Amino acid sequence: MRTLELAGEAVPVIGQGTWRMGEEPSLHKKEVAALRLGIELGMTLIDTAEMYAEGGAEEVVGEAITGLRDQVFLVSKVYPHNASHKGIPQACERSLRRLDTDYIDLYLLHWRGQYPLEETVEAFERLREEGKIGRWGVSNFDVADLEELASPACATNQVLYNLQERGIEFDLLPWCQQQRMPVMAYCPVGQGGQLLKDHTLGQIAERHGVTPAQIALAWLLRQDNVIAIPKAVQTEHVRLNAGAANLKLAPQDLAALDLMFPQPEGKQRLAMV
C-alpha cells in the first residue's frame, strides 16, 4: 500500500477509524477481528479517541493490537476538557491502560477548548519527552487556529473531509500542504450513507468495477498529503477499503465529480461532526 510520512514514520494512506466502536458489546469480537484483518491488509494506522464510547473504542483497539503493537501506528485523541497541564497526562495514562500499550505514536487534541494552546502544547511535549507519545497534533483546527498554534512540532490536522464536505480545499488544505503537514480525513465516505447513493458516484464506480465507497476514498487520495481513516466492521468492507488504495481515477472521473460536488469558491466555516 502507498505510504506517506507522518510524524517521522511511513504510514499507509488508508488507515482504520474506530468511531462508534466499543458501543455495543455484542459487536466486540467482530470489531476486533475487523481491525486485525485491516492490519493484515496493510492498514496499520489505527485512529481512536478517549471520546469514542467513552474509552470503549480504545479497549477494542487494545485487544486488536495484542501481539501486533510493533506493526501498528497508533493515533488517539484527548478531550478538550482534559487538555490542561494536569489533565493531559492523566488522560493519556487512562488511554494507555485501555490500549494496553506503553506509548501512543500520535496524540491529538480532539478540538479546541477552554485551555490555552500553550498549556496543551507544554503538556504534550512533556509526554513526548517521557516517551509516552511519539508526536502530537490537532483535530478540527482551521487556518486561524493553526496560525495561532504556530508550532512546527504539530504533526497533523485531522478534519472532516469528503466529496460532500470540500470546504477545506479553499484555504486549510493548501495551508497544510505548504507547511508539509499531512491531513487526516475523517468520515471519508460521508455520513448516513447519502453520499454513496449518489448517481454520478455510482456510474463511476460501475465503470471501474468497484464500489462507490472505493471511488470516494480514491478521490481523497488523489492528493499526496491526505490520509483517509474509514471505519469498517464487515470483513468485506475492510477488504474493499484496503483495495481503494490502488485505484486511480481518470481525469473525466474527477471532472464529473467536480460538477456534482463543486469545489468551494470562498471561505467556509470548518465542518465538524
Image (cartoon, grey):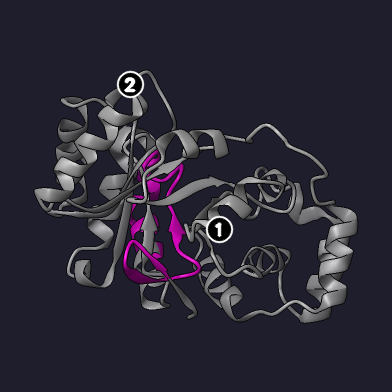
Residue in the image at 48% along x and 47% along y: 158
Q: Position of residue 83 (x, y in %)?
A: 28, 28
Asked whether the beta carbons under mark 1 and mark 2 sit within 8 Å of each other, the answer is no
Residue 212 located left or right of residue 230:
right
Mark yes or no: residue 51 visible: yes
- Up-down: is 222 above or below 29? below
Q: Position of residue 223 (x, y in %)?
A: 63, 67
Residue in the image at 54% along x and 65% along y: 225
* Disc assigned to residue 137: none
Where disc 1 sits, the SS reads helix
Label 1 – label 2 distance at C-alpha: 28 Å
Residue 59 located left or right of residue 140:
left
| Residue linked to disc 1 | 178
Check disc 1 and give the amino acid type.
Answer: Gln
Residue in the image at 60% along x and 81% along y: 246
Residue 57 located left or right of residue 105:
right
- Up-down: is 122 above or below 64? above
In the figure, residue 46 lies in which quadrant?
A: bottom left
| Residue linked to disc 2 | 115
Residue in the image at 33% along x and 32% along y: 54
Q: Position of residue 58 (x, y in %)?
A: 29, 46
Mark yes or no: residue 231 visible: no
Locate the C terminus and report the quarter of the image it occupies: top right
Q: Which residues are magenta?
A: 5-34
Q: Residues within 10 Å of mark 1 (few under 14, many from 20)?
A: few
Q: Position of residue 198 (x, y in %)?
A: 83, 55
Check disc 2 and give the amino acid type.
Answer: Tyr
